[in-house]
Image (cartoon, rainbow, N blue to C red):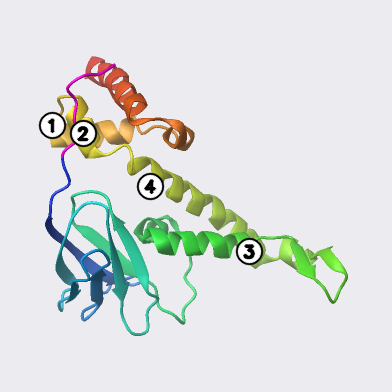
Amino acid sequence: MLIGLQLPSVQAQDIKGYVYELVSSTPLWNTTIKNIRTQEVVQSDRDGSFKIGGQLNDYLVFTNPGYKQDTIFYYENNIRRIYMTRDESLISIDEVIVSRMTDSRLAAEIAKAQNEGKAVDASQERGGLRVSPSRLFGKKAKESRRNLSMLVAEQEKRDVDRRFTTQLIAATVPLSPDEIALFRERFRPTAEFAKKASTEDFKVYILDSYKKFKSNQ
């Protein structure tokens, strides 16, 4: 058992960030940001910047006319960059765009890709399930299935990062902020481990990885 290792307490603070249009990266001013826990509401400035009171584990809702409403979960102390999607546009997904998506938008795109990539249709009028060649071999279906693997990989990475945090690493081993960033990238555990591991399991994993990290320096 590990003794004397404690995570930093959750404290009130200012949550800072910037709001951008997803595809063009244009700053979005006059975006409404609401903290669900405190009910505080602020607007983004001309350069897309915003500041709102909050703390770790808060949910912020972003709304802007002409864009899809989005929600973020604030789980790390850093400046957030929020990318909003236009309601009327279909985006061409690539790795850069996927990495910009908020968690709720990422989940919506995964559901969309799963639906568009299905090769089976369910239809009461046509006698139940049937295989659709256009959905199986069509360009859109192929692209959706290709995008799905990229989207799911990003979602799994974020799920791991919510547990494999800089706070937990800093509370477990003596590394500088720069070293933690490198350590976190090099020794990020698998999504399967993150789903099953307890906090103590993570600490043991960090200690074991720390030995490897220092031996390679």
Q: Is residue 178 above or below residue 207?
A: below
Q: Residue at x 22, y 38 (%)?
A: 166
Q: Position of residue 43 (x, y in %)?
A: 18, 77
Which amino acid type corresponds to the residue marked 2 in the rendered image? Ile
Nearer the N terminus, badge 2 or badge 4? 4
Dot 3 crowding, Cα within 10 Å, few <14, some 14–19, many 20+ = some
Which amino acid type corresponds to the residue marked 1 in the rendered image? Ser
Q: Nearer the viewer, mark 2 or mark 4?
A: 4
Q: Position of residue 127 (x, y in %)?
A: 88, 70
Residue 3 located within the stretch drawn in magenta = yes
Q: Residue at x 37, y 55 (%)?
A: 99
- Give residue 180's mark: 2
Q: CA distance from mark 1 to mark 3?
A: 44 Å
Q: CA distance from mark 3 to mark 4?
A: 22 Å
Q: Label 3, secondary structure: give it.
A: helix
Q: Label 2, secondary structure: give it.
A: helix
Which amino acid type corresponds to the residue marked 4 in the rendered image? Arg
Which portion, as a residue range, is magenta?
1-8
Q: Position of residue 146 (x, y in %)?
A: 58, 54
Q: Are marks 3 and 2 in contact (CB under 8 Å)?
A: no
Q: Is residue 16 above or below residue 217?
A: below
- The residue labelled by disc 3 is 115
Nearer the N terminus, badge 3 or badge 2? 3
Quadrant of the rendering where the N terminus is positioned: top left
Given residues 71 and 8, the one toward you in this image is: 8
- Give residue 158's mark: 4
Q: Are marks 3 and 4 in contact (CB under 8 Å)?
A: no
